[in-house]
């Protein structure tokens, strides 16, 4: 049993085109220099996972890969925003002083999981049993779950792609001899031509799009007034390729009752704000004439996808206004450009958000329920963004069509959104243990009753305090314009959760060692047992068995050079905070571990 509990979840090996050979010195003469200049990471992934997939490529373009010549001096000159300092002070007050403890080869090899969790006076037998049951349950789920790719290396390929692949208009058509409607594609650009394998796959995707544009088709009848809605969905191919659907549902101009249309852009690129700007222009033109929409989308098809911080200009013509130039710009940090935390916190209290976050960390099944498509879409994307720098590796469907609701019977982890109109059908299904969240009433329709105790108590308290005081922290005086720009709800929420991960796994890079073959190996047990807090070690005992953690570490074991992501910057700053006594204890252990690995290699 111990062997099963301590073995990491297995991820698939990378295709030969994605395999990497890691090079670099095998000794650790200077721990500081190595931790900062030789750590390999992949961090600015946009947190938009999909049905059985890994994060969207959009965020990968945020950071060009760099050489490993970063020096300690460059990191020390980073300026930490005031907002981040305020969040850090809350965590420091709650957690106590010591974070890492002294290690030896003997206590790493002989200490058992139970020893770690029975020393604290606050630990009860019931809590330990619950912890063990969660660990075994997670292992059982992961054995049944498929594995997904976690390493993305097609940066240049994606950057050179066109802005989008398809633009479609979906309308409701009355069914023959029935008083109901079904969604159909009434316009498509560009048209599919050659009957190749790729075209056949594209046809299959196009057949699925209407269901996602109208998951509530059976509930519709003609209306005279309707406020337009914006939402998104994701499609995943059998090969793991991902497409994002950005939709604007609106009522065509006219008189009397009529049915809405959905204008949908299909792209490989996950950047919600940019495509929302495009849909704003689509709606403006549709208000004049549908004929003005199509030339605009054709001109966009010929435009490149802008790099972070860059702007592209699209020339268009509009009757009455003449020639126009529309600017599409991506922010320098596009990690959160698809996220609206304000919508999430307007629907759920801080305490409920943290409990949902804890359930996702342990890769449980989570169902969101809401009345509106836009509410589902914005809230479910926001809660996934809380997982950064990790990414949801399992089934992810922000808006699940009613015809596909039986997916919730899946025994493996999932995160899905359902419209309230699907609830009667959902209640008839044999759903396994799941957290069911009602966004309209801020309550859990169904839960497992342990959500409040999944996270380390002190860190959960710090996270809750930072989020409860979000307005006060944002509104405090700042020293510079850059601080003012950073003082936003999105920045605060993201940094509060990043700090949670720094307190739990921020020392991971200290335990990436290199063997005689030049391969980087993560020392799992040493990493976990180096944490001074028993409650954090208990949490890591569960979290380290997740696909999220396995993918995070696998990326860092295989990656040859690091991306300058926000999380890695915060890791470097966090390690600078550690007292020298804690650092030296880790160094001494790693030196002994390295000697033992060399001996075993020679012996074999």
Image: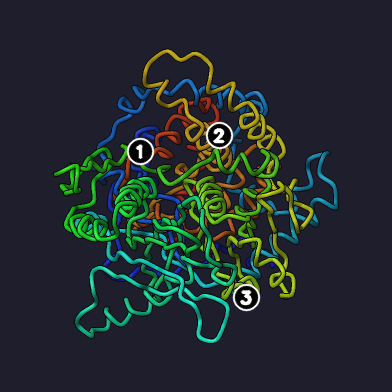
Choose between 564 and 314: the one closer to the eye: 314
Name the residue rendered at 75%, 46% in the picture: 452
Which residue reaches farthest right? 125
Choose between 600 and 190: the one closer to the eye: 190
The secondary element bearing badge 3 is classed as helix
Question: Does residue 162 appear to the left or right of 102 in the view shown?
Answer: left
Name the disc covering residue 496, or none. 2
Name the residue rendered at 59%, 68% in the picture: 219
The secondary element bearing badge 1 is classed as loop
Name the disc covering residue 210, or none. none
- The answer to which of marks 3 and 1 sits earlier in the sequence is 1
Name the disc covering residue 333, or none. 1
Where is residue 481? Give x, y as percent. Answer: 37, 18
Question: Does residue 263 appear to the left or right of 347 in the view shown?
Answer: left
Name the residue rendered at 30%, 55% in the picture: 22
Q: Quadrant of residue 12?
A: bottom left
Question: Does residue 197 appear to the left or right of 232 in the view shown?
Answer: left
């Amino acid at each position: 049993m111990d062997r099963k509990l301590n073995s990491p979840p297995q991820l698939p090996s990378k295709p030969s085109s994605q395999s990497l050979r890691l090079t670099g010195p095998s000794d650790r003469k200077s721990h500081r220099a190595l931790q900062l200049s030789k750590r390999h990471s992949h961090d600015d992934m946009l947190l938009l996972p999909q049905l059985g997939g890994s994060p969207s490529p959009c965020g990968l373009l945020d950071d060009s890969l760099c050489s490993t010549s970063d020096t300690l001096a460059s990191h020390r000159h980073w300026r930490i925003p005031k907002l981040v300092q305020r969040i850090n002070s809350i965590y420091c007050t709650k957690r106590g002083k010591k974070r890492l403890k002294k290690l030896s080869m003997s206590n790493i090899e002989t200490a058992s999981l139970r020893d770690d969790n029975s020393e604290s006076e606050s630990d009860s037998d019931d809590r330990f049993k619950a912890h063990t049951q969660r660990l075994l349950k997670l292992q059982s789920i992961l054995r049944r779950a498929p594995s997904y790719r976690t390493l993305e290396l097609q940066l240049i390929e994606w950057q050179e792609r066109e802005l989008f692949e398809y633009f479609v208009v979906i309308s409701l058509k009355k069914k023959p001899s029935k008083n109901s409607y079904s969604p159909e594609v009434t316009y498509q650009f560009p048209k599919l031509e050659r009957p190749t394998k790729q075209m056949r796959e594209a046809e299959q995707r196009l057949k699925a799009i209407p269901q996602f544009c109208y998951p509530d088709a059976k509930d519709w009848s003609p209306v005279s007034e309707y406020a337009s809605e914006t939402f998104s969905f994701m499609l995943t191919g059998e090969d793991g390729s991902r497409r994002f659907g950005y939709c604007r549902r609106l009522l065509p101009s006219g008189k009397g009752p009529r049915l809405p249309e959905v204008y949908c852009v299909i792209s490989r690129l996950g950047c919600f704000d940019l495509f929302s700007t495009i849909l704003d222009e689509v709606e403006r033109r549709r208000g004049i004439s549908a004929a003005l929409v199509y030339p605009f989308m054709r001109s966009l098809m010929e435009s490149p996808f802008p790099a972070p911080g860059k702007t592209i200009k699209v020339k268009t013509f509009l009757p009455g206004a003449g020639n126009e130039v529309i600017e599409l710009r991506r922010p320098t940090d596009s990690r959160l450009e698809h996220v609206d935390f304000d919508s999430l916190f307007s629907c759920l209290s801080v305490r409920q958000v943290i409990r949902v976050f804890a359930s996702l960390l342990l890769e449980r099944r989570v169902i969101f329920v809401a009345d509106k498509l836009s509410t589902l879409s914005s809230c479910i994307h926001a809660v996934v963004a809380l997982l950064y720098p990790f990414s949801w590796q399992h089934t992810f469907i922000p808006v699940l069509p009613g015809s596909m609701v039986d997916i919730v019977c899946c025994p493996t982890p999932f995160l899905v959104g359902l419209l309230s109109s699907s609830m009667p059908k959902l209640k008839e299904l044999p759903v396994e243990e799941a957290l069911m969240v009602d966004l309209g009433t801020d309550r859990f329709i169904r839960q497992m009753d342990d959500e409040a105790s999944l996270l380390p108590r002190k860190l959960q308290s710090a996270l809750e305090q930072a989020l409860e005081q979000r307005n006060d922290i944002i509104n405090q005086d700042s020293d510079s314009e850059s601080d003012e720009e950073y003082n936003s709800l999105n920045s605060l929420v993201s940094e509060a959760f990043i700090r949670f991960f720094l307190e739990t796994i921020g020392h991971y890079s200290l335990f990436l060692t290199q063997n005689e073959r030049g391969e980087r190996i993560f020392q799992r047990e040493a990493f976990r047992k180096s944490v001074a807090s028993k409650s954090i070690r208990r949490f890591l005992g569960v979290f380290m068995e997740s696909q999220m953690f396995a993918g995070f570490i696998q990326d860092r074991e295989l990656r040859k050079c690091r991306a300058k992501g926000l999380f890695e910057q915060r890791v470097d700053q966090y390690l600078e905070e550690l007292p020298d006594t804690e650092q030296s204890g880790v160094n001494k252990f790693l030196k002994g571990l390295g000697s033992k690995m060399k001996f075993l290699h020679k012996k074999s």
